[in-house]
Image (cartoon, grey):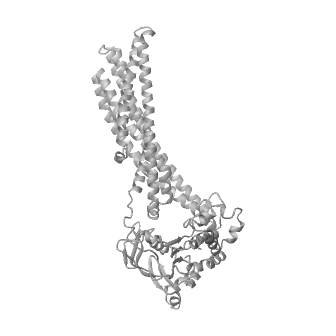
Amino acid sequence: MFDRRLLALPKIKVTLLYLIVLTGIQALAIVGQGISLSQALVWLWEGKGLSSITIPVLLFALFFGLRQLLVVVKNYVMANFADQTVENYRIALLEKYAKLGSPLIAKFGTGQAVSVLAAGLDNVKNYFQLILIKVGDLSIIPWIVLIAITYFKWIQGLFLLLIFPVIIIFFIILGLAAQKKADDEYQNFKNLNNRFVDGLRGLPTLKQLGLSRAYGQEIYQISEDYRKTTMRTLIIAITSTFALDFFTTLSIAVLAVFLGLDLLNGRMTLFPALSILILAPEYFLPLRSFADDYHATLDGKNAYAEVLEVLDMPEMTDQNQLHLAEWRATSNLQVKNLNFSYQDQPNLVDLNFDLRGYERVAIVGESGSGKSTLLNLLGGQLLPQVDSQISIDGQELPHLAQQDWQKQFFYLPQAPYIFHASLKDNLTFYYPQADQKALDLAIKQAGLTELVAELPDGLATIVGEGGRQLSGGQVQRVALARMFLDPRRRVLLFDEPTAHLDVQTELALKESMAPLFEDHLVLFATHRLHWLKQMDYVLVMRDGHLVEQGQPAVLLAQADSQLNVLRDALHQGVKL
């Protein structure tokens, strides 16, 4: 339950020292509270007046108040520690997400990545606040109370000492079962997060295909699995708490019986017997309190392990090997034996090709052939296997996650992101120093003049989430305008940018894109083969293999070419 990695946290030693001192004083206050209460009750039993118990009652009130004050102080200390530590983790996670990007999402999924940053860190904060206090109480309070009980009657202290490990062992057995169920619950929670986020992102497509209800049923089934695993975990947690309460109560009852026999036989006076009986529940209280929050700490520990797993993911340390001031007409990118595997399954296998100067290269293939994966590798968002060979202008590189390379290109996905900001801020996001003249030209080139004219506040209109909603074609035009604005980037990566657009919108965008292709290296992944007329070269992919490459006209002229096979499949209605 206690993760040893907690001991490596900043300021943990000082915080633990505070907790140890405060918990030690709290334990002494508990003993003082029990003894003073016992003394007051004994004197009342002996028939002394109320005035005679003033001092024991005042001492009881003092010790009781001190005990409660120390609980508040301990919670305050741990709350500050947890807040600061979790905030540091939040910043570190955001930095890690920004550095790793696609590899992290590929491993954990979008839903889980978001969940770790939000609900996950909330659980971690709860874990920090609970676990150190609970473990501290369990490590200190019972033994100081036991010393006091042993002082009054050593045989009663020995009985409590021997029964404690028996209860602990029973609790561990149930705890291991709860741990297994909690792991299953957390796995279902991650699955639910990822599927739900994917469903939201793909909801327009699902609606168009008439699959939204079916997918909704799938989300419902996953949520039901999560509910069932949560209930199974809670059943074990509640059972363990009940069993623990039963055994501790039974132990106190047995202790009371022996104390009663000792009183009847004259082997013990009322004061020590009553003191032992009052202190005995305090001896078991930290263990019972730990059991009450066991399930919450399990969730927090799982979330903490997830956070550390993300932070421990290796970062690329060789991102500055490439020295490339600007991609030119004479530049050359060579790729040999390019391989990539996803979850130990080969995704791209032995790809070989050259990209030169300002070529316009189409990447075509059926869905799942590896087009997007290849673009992500060329963009440095994914890392190839170590046996892959990549070079730019003769410079050998382990991967393309190079700062000087990533400064050269724009990446246009199927659904570019529109920020909640003004249209102008969205257009100049990558090139904020653009002047108004350049902005007006980019708007014209991207075909946004009509949109800007009809907006109530023109370029100052807020768009994106919570603002003016743009159509798919308008979103793509905003992304194109970003490209037109920045003259420094001479490499363009397109990942099926018109896949979800109707034919008319696509043809209109095609006219806007054509000027952008001039004096650029263009890599255009698409399943719509009419784009081949704008291309100088084509890479034909199938099942992760590069099965054919060359000039489109030359390949189409060959009856047995794979490009013709692909074209025929498209005409027959095969989904590409």
- Compared with residue 167, is residue 330 higher up or lower down, i.e. above or below? below
Would residue 231 be seen by someone viewing this image from the given angle?
yes
Left or right of 387, for residue 224: right
Left or right of 504, for residue 159: left
Would residue 388 be seen by someone viewing this image from the given angle?
no
Front-most of 196 and 339?
339
- Compared with residue 114, is residue 378 higher up or lower down, i.e. above or below? below
- Rendering coords of residue 333 (x, y %): 43, 79
Write the residue at 39% across / 27% down: 281
Write the residue at 68% across / 68% down: 452
Assign the N terminus to one quadrant of the image. top left
Front-most of 332 and 296?
332
- Compared with residue 433, is residue 181 higher up or lower down, i.e. above or below? above
Residue 74, quarter of the rendered image: top left
Residue 37, quarter of the rendered image: top left
Assign the C terminus to one quadrant of the image. bottom right
